[in-house]
Image (cartoon, rainbow, N blue to C red):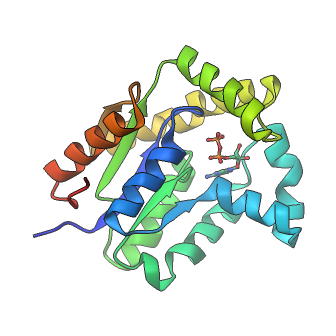
Amino acid sequence: MTTSARLLIVGPQGSGKGTQGVRVAEALNIPVVSTGDIFRANIKAGTELGQQVTAILEAGDLVPDELTSEIVRDRLSQEDAADGFLLDGYPRNTTQVAHLDAFLAESDAALAAVILLDVPREESLTRLRLRAVEQGRSDDTDEAIAHRLDIYEHETAPIISVYEQRGIVDRIDGVGSLDEITARISAALSARGIGQLV
Ligand code: ADP
């Protein structure tokens, strides 16, 4: 029997969760739902949502929970996410965990696994500085990075213990080559009966 691949990837900024998330989702043929990507796409397209969140993202603050959860709910209601999805960047605090739980419970569903990418702070900072040079993301200034890492530590890290109590967290060493890390994630998911990534 295969388990529905309703997944969350979580890790500090610079942990490589975006990159690994895309790889895992492609291998499992499920959509990635990245709240950061959704916000950035809206900013780029100049939508009303984009205008609403531009300053928030630039400062590295969190977009209000209600608004974020509503966007995710809409996205997860689409047909391609019916049997599986990989969330990246949501939930990001315990309020959002409660919102997601409530939404999934409506269809008797729940997350099957939470992939936690473990990367030392120094390594994250090095990778983020490199990304700032390569991609020029407006929230990759030293100040916004420090603020986002603080929010991660204080608001996002606590959600891990919530999921640990449910026994669904796979802690993955996030230091190594891209392929090595994908292989580690693959092995952890396989052990839960989720997919067969190569
Ligand atoms: P990073 O993990 O490097 O901070 P993301 O792309 O995940 O990058 O998020 C970028 C920004 O988008 C966040 O700093 C925040 O402003 C906003 N954002 C993304 N996800 C959420 C969320 N779940 N709740 C609130 N704000 C969010």
Which one is nearer the viewer's eye here, 133 or 64?
133
At a point 45% along the width and 80% down the height, the residue shown is 80
Residue 165 versus residue 80 in the image, above or below: above
Q: Which image quadrant is residue 118 in?
A: top left
Relative image position of residue 17 (x, y in whole percent): 49, 42
Residue 76 position within the rendered picture, expressed as x and y whole percent measured from the top left: 50, 74
At horizontal 26% and vertical 68% (from top left) the residue drawn is 4
- Given residues 154 and 13, the one toward you in this image is 13
In the image, is residue 123 above or below residue 169? above
**In this rendering, would 49 be left or right of 22?**
right
**Number of numbered discs present?**
0
- Residue 162 in percent (x, y) is at 38, 42
Q: Residue furthest left?
A: 1
The picture quadrant where one finds residue 150 is top right
**169 or 5: nearer the eye?**
5
The image quadrant of residue 51 is bottom right
Q: Residue furthest top?
A: 122
